[in-house]
Image: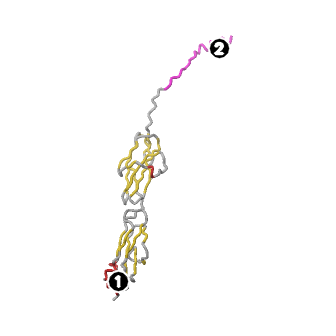
């Protein structure tokens, strides 16, 4: 009998898969597989439980997937598929949040414009901010200060012009960020001109007087 097996047949099956983080992230993580300290065992891993690769160092994981691990001793113990350890990675998220405007711009001049803003994301929302700007150029993330709740209404009640854009900053718990704008909203908060027109004087000269003057000149 293999002297290593005196530790018990269960020892060869003791593998543990550990992730560098289980929190939502948009970066790659590492998976470390711990195998039993038994001389001569073969350490293997797989991503489909079919094709096996010798395990030499921690694995770099850049997408969600299932990691399989097995260890086989000199008597081929551990090759049975029922003895395979596994762990499914679910915390990698590289997808940006999606933003939907209830009213996406308006070309009707109004004193006040409003729209609902809904943000969806699989990992969960961490930050929601907005700002109104008369610019179609994306602002810096640090310039956003006002916050809102997904599904809520955002209103603009001042300003004048046909180029007011509602900019939204949405960041999920994995760190993915979306900065997106609405179509243009038209606003008119300019007070009407109530100044009375300035009177101008008009001089009227009699036609009869002009003719008499012309006749005297002829004489």
Location of residue 149 with respect to 28 vertically, above or below: above
- Residue at 47 percent across and 26 percent down: it is 196
Which quadrant of the view contains residue 31? bottom left
Location of residue 169 with respect to 57 vertically, above or below: above
Q: Quadrant of the C terminus?
A: top right
Q: Nearer the viewer, residue 215 or 103?
A: 103
- Residue at 59 percent across and 15 percent down: it is 207
- Residue at 38 percent across and 85 percent down: it is 74
Q: Secondary structure at mark 2?
A: helix
Location of residue 39 with respect to 177 vertically, above or below: below
Crowd class of label 1 (few under 14; some 14 to 19; many from 20; radius 10 Å): some
> Residue 77 has which mark?
1
Q: How is the image coloured?
A: secondary structure
Find residue 41 and report its horizontal and vertical position in percent: 38, 82
Find residue 107 and report its horizontal and vertical position in percent: 44, 43
Q: Earlier in the sequence, mark 2 or mark 1?
A: 1
Find residue 217 and report its horizontal and vertical position in percent: 67, 12
Viewer-side label of 2, 1: 1
Which quadrant of the view contains residue 106? top left
Q: Residue furthest right?
A: 219
Q: Nearer the viewer, residue 164 or 70?
A: 70
Q: Which residues are magenta?
A: 197-219
Crowd class of label 2 (few under 14; some 14 to 19; many from 20; radius 10 Å): few
Find residue 136 and report its horizontal and vertical position in percent: 48, 48
Distance of mark 2 from mark 1, alpha carbons?
Answer: 134 Å
Residue that label 2 marks = 214
Q: Residue furthest bottom?
A: 1
> Residue 51 has which mark?
none
Decide if residue 7 is on the left or right side of residue 185: left
Q: Nearer the viewer, residue 130 or 28?
A: 28
Cβ atoms at labels 2 and 1 below 8 Å apart: no
């Amino acid at each position: 009998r293999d002297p290593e097996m005196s530790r018990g047949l269960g020892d060869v099956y003791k593998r543990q898969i550990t992730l560098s983080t289980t929190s939502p992230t948009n970066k790659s993580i590492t998976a470390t597989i711990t195998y039993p300290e038994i001389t001569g065992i073969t350490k293997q891993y797989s991503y489909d439980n079919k094709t096996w690769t010798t395990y030499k160092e921690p694995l770099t994981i850049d997408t969600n997937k299932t990691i399989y691990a097995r260890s086989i001793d000199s008597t081929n113990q551990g090759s049975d598929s029922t003895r395979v350890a596994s762990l499914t990675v679910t915390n990698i998220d590289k997808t940006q949040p999606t933003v939907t405007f209830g009213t996406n711009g308006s070309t009707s001049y109004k004193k006040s414009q409003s729209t609902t803003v809904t943000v969806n994301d699989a990992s969960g929302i961490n930050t929601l901010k907005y700002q109104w700007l008369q610019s179609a150029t994306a602002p810096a993330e640090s310039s956003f200060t006002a916050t809102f709740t997904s599904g809520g209404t955002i209103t603009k009640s001042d300003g004048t012009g046909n180029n007011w854009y509602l900019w939204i900053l949405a960041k999920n718990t994995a760190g993915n960020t979306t900065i997106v704008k609405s179509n243009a909203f038209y606003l008119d908060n300019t007070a009407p001109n109530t100044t009375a027109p300035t009177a101008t004087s008009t001089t009227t000269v009699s036609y009869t007087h002009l003719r008499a003057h012309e006749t005297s000149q002829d004489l």
